[in-house]
Amino acid sequence: MQEERFADLLPLDFLAKVLPANGVSPSGIRMVQDQGARGFHLSTSQGSPSFPASHLFINCDYFPEEFSIVVTMKASRIASKKNEYIFTVVEKDSNNLLLGLRYSQDKLHFLFWNYGNRDHITFRSVKLADNRWHTLILAVSGVYASLTVDCGIPVDLVLRRPFPAHLNTKGSRFHIGNWRRLKGLFSGLLRQLVLLPGSDATSIICPTSNPRLAVLSIPQVLLDLPVKPSENEVLKYPYAKQRLDYVEEYQDFYTNSETLDIEIFEIPSVGLFAATANKRPVPGSGIYKWTNGKFEPYQNITTYQAQAWKYFTIDDKIFLAVANFEKNERNQEYSVIYKWSRRRLKFSSYQTIETHSARDWESFQIVGETFLAVANHRQGGNHNIDSVVYKWNPGTQLFEANQTIPTSGAYDWEFFTVGPYSFLVVANTFNGSSTQVYSRIYIWLGGMFRLFQSIMTFGATDWEVFQFGGRVFLAVANSQKYDKSGQSSYAINSTIYELNITAQIFVRFQDISTYSAVDWEFFTLGEDKFLVVANSYDGKSYSLNSVIYRWQGYEGFVPVHRLPTFGCTDWEKFNTTDSSYLIYSSAREDISKVLKLKTY
């Protein structure tokens, strides 16, 4: 099966290009919250927000021939004859405008340089300056241009001449909210400004439940909740400056038996919970509630060598799915979805699904539909079997098989999105003879997952995806090298991959020495970004240091804290109103530990 790539390029976020990666407040940009959404207010008093076109078009200087531009903005009423620029592309030396988008009180104007002449498209009766949020999609292809506002009915125009196939941007700059001068300065709020080459974004982001704030790609800083919003809704950038000082033991968390996984979740108006995936069926796996500053037993559920829990919601319904590895006492092999009862304040069995030594569940949504993917590890002695993606049927109120995917000793699924694209990556552990096996990344195309990329892994047990600064990373936990010779090696590298937008593949970014790694957990604290690895076994001992790594920019992730663990299999980070914590599970004893992150 050949690998498939994007049919088109990924969204190119203009706003992300003028935001700093180091947390320093950018000149000329102020974050403002208004009508429940955040946007940037621009100013030229400290320098025009801009970036070289070469930062956007890396391997080709030409502006795409077919494209769409997505803008989410809020503007107050302006003078009838006044125009304000949303963005421009300007030649560096001549100040010649190659391309620009501007609006007036009731019009939207798109300007571009077309083989020695400046062409001008005007969409009339477009009321954007009404002090409300609006999302507009301008799509251009050949001699056709269309404008969709708030996912409404598109307005189509025919151009006098086709959009140029070779609009050269070499040596030019993108200017956000201006044309290299104070004239036409954008006075409103910008929340989204994205170029999607090769595609009309309308079908991707519409319809939506909130069309005025329809999303293709928005800088993460506009999505994050502020730590302490001020009363007038004007937010400082960045919000928090907590720094990790050290880690201290906080609670010995006694579990029913050895623990393979911990799921942290919060039920609104009820509280914070932890579900432990425990080895022994009696008393089963435990659910614990955060009470008076620590986790206390809340409910036991019979499970069969549980490997993982997954918490998810559908509309107002709350579920927990458990992955059972062993058969029950009646020799039946299945995993169970539990539903939260608001009357009893407990979880009860809702749906059983046939699985085969299930290792993991992953829940996700695509275009408003809910899916569950199970990682089937083996059936009897056969590791090369199908794992299954299930889809929620609103009519039957049950999950039904939607797609099977061949896997080899599947251990973990991880779902993530990049712009409008949805991905599912599997950690394949063992093919029956060797742990050197391809793990695979799938992309959602045409209503199903199709192979996007294969990556060689060594007993892969976990994928962790994280994104910041417009970059997308995937970290794999490699557990061991083993083949038919019978030789095993547990001291091996785990690897971080980064998405190369231009090549449209994940490429190796950093190798990190690990010892039978079973889990990665990415977390942030203030402005800092961290990865913690679960080192479980070095070939001789389960007593090992698991390590916290901090993002150091050019240096990648560097070790900053070494934490003594015993048979560590999972890390989770959680927050309470008082502090931030890490919790780890042990597969070798019935004690897991809660650690407190001390900051300064």
Image (spheres, rainbow, N blue to C red):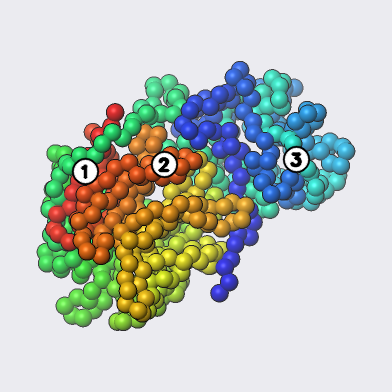
Q: In this rendered view, identify the residue nearer to me: 176 or 583.
A: 583
In this image, 272 relative to 33: left or right?
left
Earlier-in-chain disc, 3 versus 1:
3
Label 1 near label 2: C-beta < 8 Å? no
Give the vertical position of 228 relative to 146 (above or below).
above
Q: Name the residue under label 2.
A: 551
Check the picture and name the quadrant holding the N terminus: bottom right
Q: Which amino acid does label 3 sit on?
A: Thr
Q: Mark 1 points at which residue?
A: 595
Q: Nearer the viewer, mark 2 or mark 3?
A: 2
Distance of mark 2 from mark 3, alpha carbons?
Answer: 34 Å
Q: Which quadrant does the C terminus fall into?
A: top left
Q: Quadrant of residue 159?
A: top right
Quarter of the rendering containing residue 57: top right
Instruction: Say what secondary structure mark 3 lies in.
Output: loop
Determine the residue positioned at 15% across, 67% down: 280
Q: Dot 1 surroundings within 10 Å: few (below 14), some, or many (20 or more)?
A: some
